[in-house]
Each structure stands twice: as structure tokens, then as C-alpha cells.
Image (cartoon, rainbow, N blue to C red):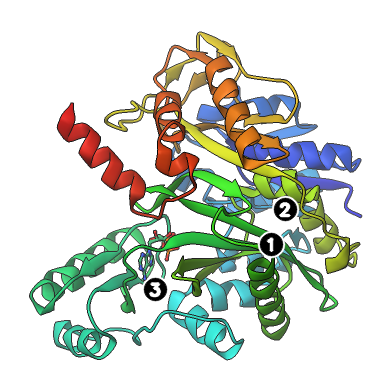
Amino acid sequence: MFEKVLIANRGELALRIHRACREMGIRTVAVHSEADANAMHVRLADEAVCIGPARSAESYLNKQAIISAALITGADAIHPGFGFLSENADFAEMVELHGITFIGPTAEQMRLLGDKITARQAAIEAGLPITPGSAALESVEDARVWANKIGYPVIIKAKDGGGGKGMKVAFSDEDIAEAYTMAKAEAKAAFPSDVVYMEKYLQHPRHIEMQILADKYGNVIHLGERDCSIQRNHQKVIEECPSPALNQSQRQEIGQIVCNAIKKIGYQNAGTLEFMYEDGKFYFLEMNTRLQVEHPITEAVSGIDIVKEQIRIASGAALGYTQEDIQFRGHAIECRINAEDPDTFAPCPGKITEWHAPGGLGIRVDSEIYSGYTIPPFYDSMIAKLIVHAKTRNAALMRLRRALEEFIIMGVKTTIPLHQNIISQHEFIDGQYNIHWLTEYMNKHQKKA
Ligand code: ADP
């Protein structure tokens, strides 16, 4: 097992990884930007190294600085977390070349699955159900030809896309030129490549994803699904486990398909296969070759600590579980709480003057915040994840309502009122929502106001 792990991340996630290491008797190295010198994970880690100025490009994305920090402190592994360098195959390769273990899949697996076009091909070969789609698009004319072959509506996506950026929907030949041009321009601005491709656009799907764990010896298990259909701008807002839309036999069926596919691909470590689910059918979207923001709801229901498993697998240990050992208990819901204006979604960094997190049975709060902490303006606006777990979905909803009421964050605006609003809507209470529900609900609501 590793003796010292460097955590190449910040915020609640750096703290999450630190906690797992601590409980495994592993020493931790925090790396931080100049703006994060007072962060909680920096205070708690055994050692801390400043890796550059506030701008992520010069600190959390600075591969050389992070690897130097690992070498200087003698860390034997690096956990990349999510975001930042977590899906950067070149970084994974550099880390390994320096004799340090990258806690994640191999660089080769990341390259295959990080590119949406090659990932789709691998998914088809591995037997995953998928939406009809195109090859890389060469021109507007090419896009028009493909769209007519696939059938409108279609969505044009960047092959290197992520974070819901660079995606444009076209409903007819009239929209195709604009969708193609805009998707390509957005891809060029945000991603390494401006290559785009097209998929059939599903009109009322849910977003359901499967969590898997795979060791280096070909053992694969799944930890069930998460329903992440409550989205705004293609970004997840609330997630729940299990999905209100699936029954046990559907779960087992897709679980089996996913485990077989992962074995064929030869993937190792933790990963998530994202699907859309419409009219009883699954359509593979992409695979995230890293930990996900919403992993705690799976931990609550399965009882498995996913971060510890990632570390164990990377150290060469075999999976300690077979599929039969995994029992799903109860229901969990996560709210992503952002420091944002709940109406306009404008980021709202600043000083937290008062902080009181909810507690009690079945409550987990993952957050780096403490009273007197100043949220820097340079990074993602998520400041806390509130996770509730209870025996049934109804009980989880009651617990979530209670926990949101108890949560006190003063000094900055947060999205807590938005969450309170969402969970009191009958579509959410009944579990009858798809990926468009929140946007449609908010459009209606804003018009009335
Ligand atoms: P990213 O990598 O940017 O997160 P994804 O491919 O995972 O992009 O898609 C993000 C979200 O966009 C999905 O959860 C879904 O809401 C929507 N989406 C993506 N592809 C489609 C599609 N073919 N049909 C309908 N919605 C889609």
C-alpha cells in the first residue's frame, strides 16, 4: 500500500480524498494555489506545497509543478480527483514516467474513452446500447447529409467535450448550419480539438449512470445507478440513487451489460458509464474515467467507500468484493450547493460569516467551508454537497427537506432556496422528471414572476 498520496485537487474533493487516505493510514500532501493557502484540506494534510498563482492554468493544471511537488515530498501516488487534470492522459503518463502511481485508469484507456468518437466505437464493439451517430463532421454539408440519415432532431457535440459545453441541437435542415458552426466555435474555444460529431437527440430522456469498479486482474463489479436528470444547462443539480425509473431486474440487466463491456474494454479503477434512458431503453453517452461529484449517494446506498477502492486498486490489490456481496440499502439524494444567486445563477464568492451544517442520522455534508473562510472567485462555485440517506425515497425526501431547513450559510448567496423549491414540486416528489424538466419549470416560473 502507498505511504504518501499527493492530492492534485482543491475544495471539498481534496478534503474527501484526504479523509479516505487518513482512514487507510496513508500520509497526504496537499497542493494549492496562492489563493487557497487557507483551505481546509491544506490545513489538514500532513504536508502542503504551493504550486502557483490563483489561475488554474498556472497551478491546478500545472503538470510540472504538481509532479515536482510529488517528487520533493516523496509521494508514491497522485490522486487527481475530478475536473482539473483528472482526465488528462498526458498527465497520467508523465506521472507514471516519474515512477509515481496515477490513481486512475491507464493513459491509454483515458485516451480511448476521453474522445467521444473513439469511445462510441469502443462502446459499440463492447456491446453497449447507443444512440445512432455520425463520424467526425467535415463540413456543414456533411452535417446535413448525416442529419438526414440519422433523422432530426440531432445534437452536435465536440469530440473532446465536457461540462455540457459545445453541444448544439438542430431540429431541421434550417438549423443545421448554425448548430454546426456554433458547436465548432465553442469546441475551438474550450477544448483541445474543434472536431465535432452528431448524435440522435432524444427528446425526453432521463440521465442514468452506472458506477463500476474494476481491478487489474479483470474483476469488475457495478455499484448500481444514479439518476442525474435534474439538470440546468446540461449540468447536474440534484442526483439520486436508486433511480425512481428503474426496477431491480432492469438494474441487474444493465449492470450485467456494463460489467461485460468493461471487461472487454479492459478498463481498470473506478469509472462511470453515463446513459440516457427513454421509453425503457438505455443509450450510452460517455464514460467518465474518474471519480464523480455525485459518488457519495452510491456510497450511502452500497456501503462501499469508492475513494478507498480507487486507492486499493491503484496499489495493485484485487477487488475485495464480488457482485453478490453488493447489497443496495435505502435511498440517497444529493444536492449540489453553489455560492450563486439562486435566481440569476451569477457566482457569489466572498466571506462566509456564519456556517452551520445540518446533522443527525443519515446526513453527510462534504464541504471545505468553515466560518470565516473566504471563497475565492477563481474556481467552480460549488461549496458543499448535502447527501441524505434513508430507508425509502419518501423518508429521504423528508430528511432532505429537514436538512435544507437547518443549513445556515451567511455572507454569500447560495442555491439552497432553489433546492427547497425543486424538492417541493410534485414532479420531483413523484419521481416523474426528465433532463428538461428543471429548465422548463424555471422558464415557466420566471415568466410568472
Ligand atoms: P458532457 O461530456 O459535456 O457532460 P454529455 O455527452 O455527457 O456531455 O451530455 C451532457 C448532457 O447533455 C446529458 O446529461 C443530457 O442532458 C444532454 N445530452 C447529451 N447528448 C444528448 C442526446 N443525444 N440527446 C438528448 N440529450 C443529450
Q: Residue at x 24, y 34 (%)?
A: 445
Q: Quadrant of ligand 1?
A: bottom left
Q: Is residue 127 left or right of residue 374?
A: right
Query: Residue at 76% across / 33% down in the picture?
Result: 47
Q: CA distance from mark 2 to mark 3?
A: 27 Å
Camera-near label (1 vs 3) is 3
Residue ID at (53%, 87%): 124
The label nearer to you, 2 versus 3, is 3
Q: Secondary structure at mark 2?
A: strand
Kindly check if marks 2 and 1 are in contact, taking CB atoms under 8 A apart as contact. yes
Q: Give the mark nearest the N terminus, 1 or 3.
A: 1
Element marked by disc 3: loop
Q: Between disc 2 and disc 1, whose residue precedes?
A: 2
Instruction: Give the CA separation, mark 2 to mark 1.
Output: 8 Å
| Residue 54 at x, y percent in the picture | 46, 34
Q: Report the Cα–Cα distance between label 1 and label 3.
A: 25 Å
Task: Quickly name the residue at label 3.
Answer: 159
Residue carrying label 1: 95
| Mark 1 residue element | helix
Instruction: Look at the picture and state if 248 lies above or below 400.
Output: below
- The residue furthest left is 174
- Around disc 2, counting alpha carbons within 10 Å, would you say few (fewer than 14), some (14 to 19), or many (20 or more)? many
Give the label on residue 35, or none: none
Nearest the eye: 328 or 417: 328
Q: Check disc 1 and give the amino acid type.
A: Val
Foreground: disc 2 or disc 1: 2
Q: Residue at x 44, y 12 (%)?
A: 411
Q: Which residue is mark 2?
A: 78
Which residue is more in the foreground, 59 or 366? 366
Quarter occupied by the C terminus: top left
Circle nearer the N terminus (2, 3)? 2
